[in-house]
Amino acid sequence: MPNDPTPAPAVDPTPAPVPAVDPAPAPTPAPAVDPTPAPAPAEGDVSTLPEWAQTLINEAKAKADPPQPTPPAPEPPAAEGDLSKLPKWARDQLGQAQEQARTAAVHAAVLRTAPTAGANAAALLDSQSAMTALAAIDTNDATAVAAAITAAVQAQPHLAAPVGPARGGADFGNATPPERKPGSLHDAIAARLNT
């Protein structure tokens, strides 16, 4: 190939005719693709698996995990002072203390009101029927206590306050003075001689 006897083809200096081009718009550039790759599915995410695999996995999960019962609704917080939450022994002691306080209040009301209602306070406190009647009323209401004491005195007259004498002591207005006895023999002789 060192010497090739064929001459090189001559180049035509006229430009070749350009075929008619359809005046179409320039091609639109391809939409820009976000350079960040799609997030990798999370571990345990079956949404990228085929449908039959997803069904198989979901059925296996359903068999392995029985439906959890719904937990009961939490109880509303107990109101302050809710005695039903206390143990039985505490409720018993509280009941006894309240009963003692009520009895003391009735006794104080009787002692405070009995003299003005015309009743013997000691006799009222010893009377079971009077104390039962007084326990049923409000001890802070003085008129109700007085009415209950008056009713008890009317039902049982021995509960009334004793009525004392109109005057006490001896009458010194019209009495003659008693004869005075001498304190000694000398006083007796002197008194006899002077009369």
Image (cartoon, grey):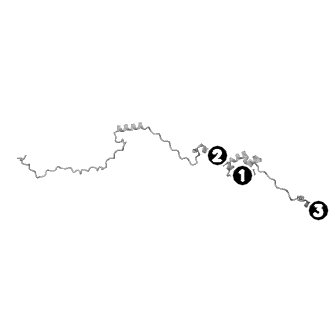
CB under 8 Å between discs 3 and 2: no
Q: Pick whichever of labels 3 and 2 is earlier in the sequence.
A: 2
Neighbourhood count class around disc 1 (C-alpha, 10 Å): few under 14, some 14–19, many 20 upward? some
Q: Which label is found at residue 111?
A: 1
The residue shown at (94%, 62%) is 193
63 shown above or below 36? above
Residue beneath disc 2: 96
| Left or right of 68 on screen, residue 99 | right
Q: What kind of residue is marked 1? A: Leu
Percent position (x, y) of residue 9? Answer: 8, 48
Q: Nearer the viewer, residue 84 or 89?
A: 89
The extreme left residue here reads 5
| Secondary structure category for the residue under label 2 | helix
Quadrant housing residue 177: bottom right
Q: CA distance from mark 1 to mark 2?
A: 23 Å
**Going 62% across and 45% down the picture, which residue do you hit?**
93
Residue 193 bears which disc, if any? Answer: 3
Q: Using residue 187 as the reference point, say whether residue 74 is left or right of it.
A: left
The correct choice, above or below, for 81 with respect to 179 in the image is: above
Depth check, front residue: 45 or 86 = 86
Q: Nearer the viewer, residue 129 or 93?
A: 93
Mark 3 vs mark 1, CA separation in Å: 64 Å
Asked whether residue 193 appears in the rendered view, the answer is yes
Q: Amino acid at mark 2?
A: Gln
Numbered tag placed on residue 165 in the rendering: none
